Amino acid sequence: MKVLVTGAKGMLGQDLCPIFEDAGMFVIETDVENLDITDFKAAENFITNTKPQIIVHLAAYTNVDGAETGREKADLINHKAAENLARISKKTGAILIYVSTDYVFDGTKTEPYLPNDPVNPLSVYGKTKALGETAVIENAEKYYIARTSWLYGINGKNFIETMLKLGKAGKEIKVVNDQTGSPTYTVDLALGILKLLNKPFGIYHISGEGETTWYDFANEIFTQEDIKADLAPVSTEEYTKGQNKVVAIRPKYSTLQNSVPMRHWKEALQSYLEYRKSLQAE
């Protein structure tokens, strides 16, 4: 099985590619340097020539706050590029896997979101990802949409690394305590995406099991690492006031009901921290 991965050099891509290779697949790694997914003709030529049976679309504009003032770029990458790949996948007969986000929801629910719940994004980022989903549904014949949440991985900037840096520096850390969701380890998401290939085409949710707030997530990081951090909970409103930039509106509640069995987020966090230590010991 030949698999083309967009955004292969990203945080998720660097974990997903070796996992797919270990599963016996031939992986074609692409990124902005060798494949412009925003150029339909160039992307069509590349995919027609390489002939993948599966396209895993990971490339995305993920700067949630930046999207508020960079709407055009976010739409081009999150929406238009997804439409290009959906159209190309239909032409070539490839299966398209599009990774989306919990931010397509408005956070008004008080229990986990189901894959068929209506979307109502609050931010430009969420809106462009929701448009990407629609483009996939309307233009691809064989597709999986995999929504995830609060992603972190060893190969990119993430919340855990930020907290550890601030905690070890002894600085006062204020973290929002009124947004609830599920932290997701990139390794677990990659394994979850692999499991989708045994399921009917459609929309699925893949995130860490259980739910937490950003403050409680930070607290668990410091507990597991035995760091006495100066940590304080704040409201989103309080936190936003202290920022010298436009801050996107996030859903208050965005826990996803998992479509495949997933590790609890605390267990996944422990695994991440242990792997991190093993790398530092090398």
Image (cartoon, rainbow, N blue to C red):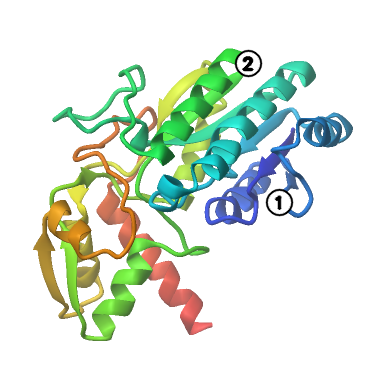
Q: Nearer the viewer, residue 106 or 282?
A: 106
Secondary element type, mark 2 = helix
Query: Image quarter for residue 107?
Result: top left
Identity, as a three-letter code, of the amino acid under mark 2:
Asn
Residue shown at the point (53%, 56%) measured from the top left: 11
Residue shown at the point (28%, 50%) measured from the top left: 265
Query: Image quarter for residue 160?
Result: bottom left
Going by the picture, which residue comes out furthest to the bottom?
169
Image mark for residue 139? 2
Position of the C terminus by quadrant: bottom right
Q: Is residue 21 left or right of residue 15?
A: right
Q: Is residue 80 left or right of residue 42?
A: left
Q: Nearer the viewer, residue 120 or 164?
A: 120
Residue shown at the point (72%, 39%) measured from the top left: 4
Residue linked to disc 1: 32
Q: Is residue 264 left or right of residue 134?
A: left
Secondary element type, mark 1 = loop
225 in relation to 258, above or below: below
Q: Nearer the viewer, residue 79 or 159?
A: 79
Identity, as a three-letter code, of the amino acid under mark 1:
Val
Query: Image quarter for residue 122?
Result: top left
Q: Position of residue 156 (x, y in %)?
A: 50, 63
Q: How many marks?
A: 2
Q: Position of residue 136 (x, y in %)?
A: 57, 22
91 in relation to 251, above or below: above
Q: CA distance from mark 1 to mark 2?
A: 23 Å
Q: Position of residue 41 (x, y in %)?
A: 82, 31
Position of the N terminus by quadrant: top right
